[in-house]
Image (tube, grey):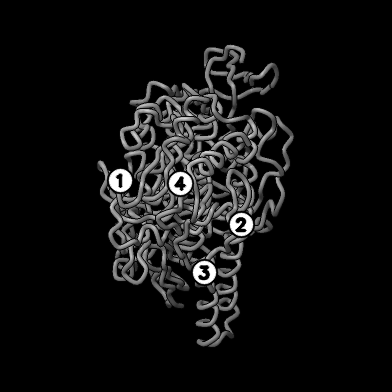
Amino acid sequence: MPATDTTVLIVGAGPAGLSMAILLGRLGIDAIVVERRSGINPHPRARSVNVRTAELMRQWGVLDEIEAASLPLPWTEQFVYCETLAGTEIGRVVTGVQPVVNGVELSPAPWLLTSQDRIEEILLRRLAGMDEVQICWDTELVEVTQGDGQVTAEVRDPSGSRHLTARWLVGADGAASNVRRSLDIEMDGIASFGTMINCQFYADLSPWTDHRPAALYWTTSPARNVFQKIDTDNRWLCQLNYDPSTHRAEDFSTETAAQWIRRSIGPDLPEDFDLRVTDVIPWVMSSTVAERFRDGRVFLIGDAAHQLPPTGGFGMNTAVQDAHNLAWKFAAVAGGHAGEGLLGTYETERAPVAQYNADRSRENSRSVGRIRRLVESGTATVEQKREALRASTQYGNWLGMDLGLRYDKGCLIPDGTEPPQVDDPVSEYVPTARPGHRAPHLPIDLEGATSTLDLYDTQFVLLCGAAVDIEAAIDGAHAEADGVQLGAAAETEVDANRDSGDAHPALRVLWLGIDLDDPSGGLAATYGIGEEGAVLVRPDGHVAWRDPQTTGATAMAALNSLLMH
């Protein structure tokens, strides 16, 4: 490979770009982040931290800070629909977003409501201690060229233009991505089906909200708005839905926005009611996915690759999980034990997820629209309104969509089994270790690890039944691939594999009933293996391969075929 300034150049320092930087830094892979802004955008924007994303943040050591910056959990438990905030309540939808079902804990992390500016602050603090990562603020991408096994980016900062070279470039630069446009990658889908104004404001809305804490308060008159509490300091976000044929985005000053918000709180609001709008941001609701997520050595993640309607809060979460899917693959190829073909599985796996999440989010938006139209008609009966609310319950009940995330093709070997059968895959989640799925959480006690999810980080992990003999196969594979590793961090975390001293440097092996206590057999049953079976889990926590009756040679052959995609 030719000499480069960095292994990975990341364009954009939003949640997607910062997550990619953290992931690479933890794997010992050097990266440079360039961001055209001078710092964090103080506007709250995204709020929802889904359970799967919270699990990743727990792994990075920042979940405690995220929780401290989040609303108390009662604010996550329902949506409220009303005509105005102080007026007639249409109804409520109870949410099912927390990972506890019938008393069974399905994750060690909760679903949280905070704000993107707080999240970015916390991620930046996490990056501050990583020597592998450099962030360049006030630096704008001008042009991208590829050739000779590297990517060259012309960037401009206050001191002038310069060139940076990297082995790979990641476009994490948002919906208006310069990276995507430079590659002439088109977006497929609905580019505009709603015009919105995001308004950050401060006011004491407790008389109308504290007795019914909710993630969202949808209003119908005199305008279609949604109120979202940001923190416990009376900071709120209101999304104004306006008609561009009668209003122009540029006409929404902070004063105009304050008038709209006051009307949606209630017509009898006192003139001296203290309400201060600090900023307004026009935007267009879209549901689009890029026609491709990769062009040579350039990859798109986050809003650069897909724009999701906010109804569901999956935009930022999908972005963070894009980074989680791709980072370990960069490390595997950079470490020399995986072929370049492994990087092709990023688009294979993530593009269908982005499309699915975009479709479900658009359906949620339509459900809200039906409720509002019924109320605005003035002729709807109480039962019709209740039926519209019942029909909208997937919106706010998406645990299956969150934790049931799966890949059907990519870096995995199907085992011929079918996914768990549920009545509603959006709301219902059944733990499974079927290849492609997120490996299930179960409580464990192993060297500080309290969840099986703690095991899946920088290496592949092979969970074996007690009767599986794999040491000879590991020794042989290690001899063939001496010095190969996922990244610098992986080298220090390789398990001793029963103190053999010859662990495969990309693999950690654990035996159920020996390394992991499983007296009830619950872990073996959930993962679908017995004493003679094994399951292989990727560094990103997705199951790659499973065999209920295997040999060490078969397991190592599976690992090698996955890495040499």
Q: Earlier in the sequence, mark 1 or mark 3?
A: 3
Determine whether, in the image, residue 235 is placed left or right of residue 477. Answer: left
- Disc 2 versus disc 3: distance between alpha carbons? 14 Å
- Disc 1 versus disc 2: distance between alpha carbons? 38 Å
Residue 452 visible in the picture: yes
The residue where tag 1 is placed is: 515
The three-letter code of the residue at mark 4 reads Gly
Q: Give the foreground label among 1 and 2.
A: 1
- Disc 4 versus disc 3: distance between alpha carbons? 26 Å
Determine whether, in the image, residue 401 is placed left or right of residue 141. Answer: left
The three-letter code of the residue at mark 2 reads Tyr
Q: Are marks 4 and 3 in contact (CB under 8 Å)?
A: no
Q: Quarter of the image containing the N terminus?
A: top right
Residue visible at 54% across and 87% down in the picture:
381
Q: Position of residue 6 (x, y in %)?
A: 52, 19
Question: What's the mark number on residue 394?
Answer: 3
Q: Give the foreground label among 1 and 4.
A: 1
Q: Are marks 2 and 3 in contact (CB under 8 Å)?
A: no
**CA neighbours of label 4 inside 10 A, class few (<14), some (14 to 19), many (20+):** many
Question: What's the mark number on residue 506?
Answer: none
- Secondary structure beneath label 3: loop
- Secondary structure beneath label 2: helix
Q: Nearer the viewer, residue 544 or 180?
A: 544
The residue where tag 2 is placed is: 356
Residue visible at 53% across and 32% down in the picture:
12
Residue 149: which quarter of the image? top right
**CA neighbours of label 2 inside 10 A, class few (<14), some (14 to 19), many (20+):** few
Question: What's the mark number on residue 541?
Answer: 4
* 447 over 87 or under it: above or below: above
- Disc 4 versus disc 2: distance between alpha carbons? 20 Å
Q: Give the foreground label among 1 and 3.
A: 1
Q: Earlier in the sequence, mark 1 or mark 4?
A: 1
